Image (cartoon, rainbow, N blue to C red):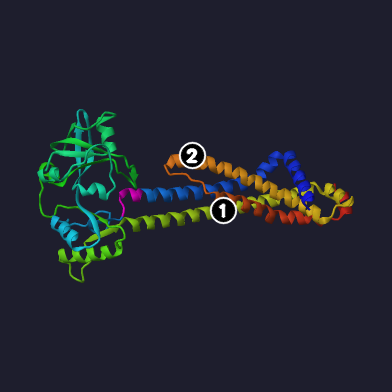
């Protein structure tokens, strides 16, 4: 049986070499199908990984308390938070590792002839550890800077590029709004997050923002509260307790909806990853349809091949070849075409994945299991769609076949 199969494979390769163009056009559907499926799955997994990395870069076990119903535009007359809210949460909600009040504002910034608008964040020193910010150069501001409202700032990598180019910003003074701040630290780059650039930021002590940059020190001055949970703490329980506490402090009645929201980055990451995986599987399924189209192409060409080689089949049957050997020959030929198409599809997928991966900036990691499944499936397509032509060839009457013109 092995020698028969090997001989059938030899004949199949000979026929493919004799009709290279037709064989290539026959396997084109398989090539496109396999390449599309592998590319979709690989880039989908890369996108999921990129989303998880971006969410992780925000901070571990991070809760974000914001006024309003969500991240979008806020309804009018919804108050911000107070420093009393920050104190109450830190004292009354167990499981909190760190907490930081945040106030953000877009301001004009300038250094020498370079000027631009930048997001300026006023907060405490805890903000850096909560949000996983690390230093590339210099130092972070400390409690004494916060108490004094010192005119110091820590800048992101994008701000450094735009204002200082390749020069070191440490010790330089930049204009932020109507005040001057000394750059004491440069943050390590984090990259893009959704539609925003995390590195396009200037971080100052909250007291500095209030006293020097905005001149606003009102009670409701906090636009967000960042909270880092302790390892092992239940984020669901903390969200419930924070919600109950904030409803009480904001004097909301039982029949009133929350005018604030607590976001859990882990839940956001899980939701986005789940959505991305579902979309990837859907796109892969759609791409898989082209494999069936390729199978139909194989069946059509093999039927044509049977018609063209009717006399050859008649001669083989007349000199003693059995019907199952003829069946095996055409099945092996169809499977060989399909498998070669699958291997070429993998090669095309590798090129597409690396090209598109660099274009859309997602990590590319090939899953060997997907590649193996793609080749096995393409072989199965060859067997499935090659069976009808092979069966037709095996059932030919030798005398009628020899008379065929």
Q: In this rendering, does residue 280 appear at all? A: yes
From the top left corner, tell me how far across and down residue 401 is, in percent. Answer: 85, 51
The residue singled out by tag 2 in the image is 355
Query: 25 or 325, which lies in front?
Result: 325
Seen from this angle, which residue lies furthest front? 231
Q: In this rendering, does residue 225 appear at all? A: no
At horizontal 35% and vertical 48% (from top left) the residue drawn is: 54
From the top left corner, tell me how far across and down residue 294 is, in percent. Answer: 63, 50
Seen from this angle, which residue lies furthest bottom? 254
When asked about the image quadrant of residue 157, the answer is top left
Inspect the magenta stretch and tell me whether residue 69 lies in it: no
From the top left corner, tell me how far across and down residue 358 is, in percent. Answer: 44, 39
- The magenta region covers 54-60
Q: Which disc is residue 402 wearing?
A: none
When asked about the image quadrant of residue 384, the answer is bottom right
Query: 383 or 76, which lies in front?
Result: 383
Which mark is nearer the camera, 1 or 2? 2
At horizontal 29% and vertical 41% (from top left) the residue drawn is: 199
> Tag 1: Cα neighbours inside 10 Å, few (<14), some, or many (≥20)?
many
User: Magenta stretch mostly in which secondary structure?
Assistant: helix
> Tag 2: Cα neighbours inside 10 Å, few (<14), some, or many (≥20)?
few
At horizontal 68% and vertical 52% (from top left) the residue drawn is: 382
Q: Check disc 1 and report its element: helix, strand or loop.
A: helix
At horizontal 21% and vertical 49% (from top left) the residue drawn is: 126
Residue 55 versus residue 145 in the image, above or below: below
Inspect the magenta stretch and tell me whether residue 58 lies in it: yes
From the top left corner, tell me how far across and down residue 47 is, in percent. Answer: 43, 48
Q: Check disc 2 and report its element: helix, strand or loop.
A: helix
The residue singled out by tag 1 in the image is 288
């Amino acid at each position: 049986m092995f020698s028969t199969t090997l001989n059938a494979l030899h004949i199949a390769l000979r026929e493919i070499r004799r009709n290279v163009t037709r064989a290539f056009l026959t396997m084109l559907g398989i090539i496109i199908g396999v390449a599309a499926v592998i590319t979709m799955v690989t880039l989908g997994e890369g996108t999921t990984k990129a989303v998880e990395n971006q969410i992780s870069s925000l901070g571990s076990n991070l809760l974000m308390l914001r006024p309003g119903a969500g991240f979008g535009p806020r309804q009018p007359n919804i108050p911000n938070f107070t420093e009393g809210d920050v104190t109450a949460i830190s004292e009354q909600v167990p499981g909190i590792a760190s907490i930081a009040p945040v106030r953000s504002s877009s301001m004009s910034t300038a250094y020498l002839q370079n000027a631009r608008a930048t997001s300026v964040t006023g907060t405490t020193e805890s903000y850096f550890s909560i949000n996983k910010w690390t230093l590339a150069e210099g130092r972070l501001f400390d409690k004494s800077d916060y108490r004094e409202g010192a005119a110091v700032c820590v800048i992101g990598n994008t701000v450094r590029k735009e204002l200082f180019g390749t020069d070191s910003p440490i010790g330089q003074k930049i204009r932020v709004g109507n005040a001057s701040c000394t750059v004491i630290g440069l943050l390590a780059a984090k990259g893009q997050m959704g539609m925003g650039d995390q590195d396009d930021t200037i971080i100052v002590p909250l007291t500095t923002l209030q006293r020097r940059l905005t001149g606003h020190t009102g009670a409701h001055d906090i636009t967000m509260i960042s909270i880092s949970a302790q390892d092992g703490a239940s984020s669901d329980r903390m969200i419930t307790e924070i919600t109950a506490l904030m409803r009480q402090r904001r004097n909301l009645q039982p029949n009133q909806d929350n005018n604030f929201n607590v976001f859990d980055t882990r839940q956001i990451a899980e939701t986005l990853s789940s959505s991305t995986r579902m979309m990837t599987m859907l796109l892969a399924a759609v791409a898989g349809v082209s494999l069936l189209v390729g199978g139909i192409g194989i069946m059509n060409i093999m039927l044509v091949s049977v018609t063209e080689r009717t006399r050859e089949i008649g001669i083989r049957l007349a000199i003693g070849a059995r019907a199952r050997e003829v069946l095996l020959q055409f099945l092996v030929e169809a499977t060989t075409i399909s498998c070669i198409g699958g291997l070429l599809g993998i090669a095309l997928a590798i090129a597409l994945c690396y090209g598109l991966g660099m274009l859309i900036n997602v990590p590319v990691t090939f899953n060997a299991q997907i590649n193996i499944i793609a080749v096995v499936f393409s072989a199965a397509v060859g067997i499935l769609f090659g069976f009808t032509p092979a069966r037709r060839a095996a059932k030919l009457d030798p005398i009628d076949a020899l008379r065929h013109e």
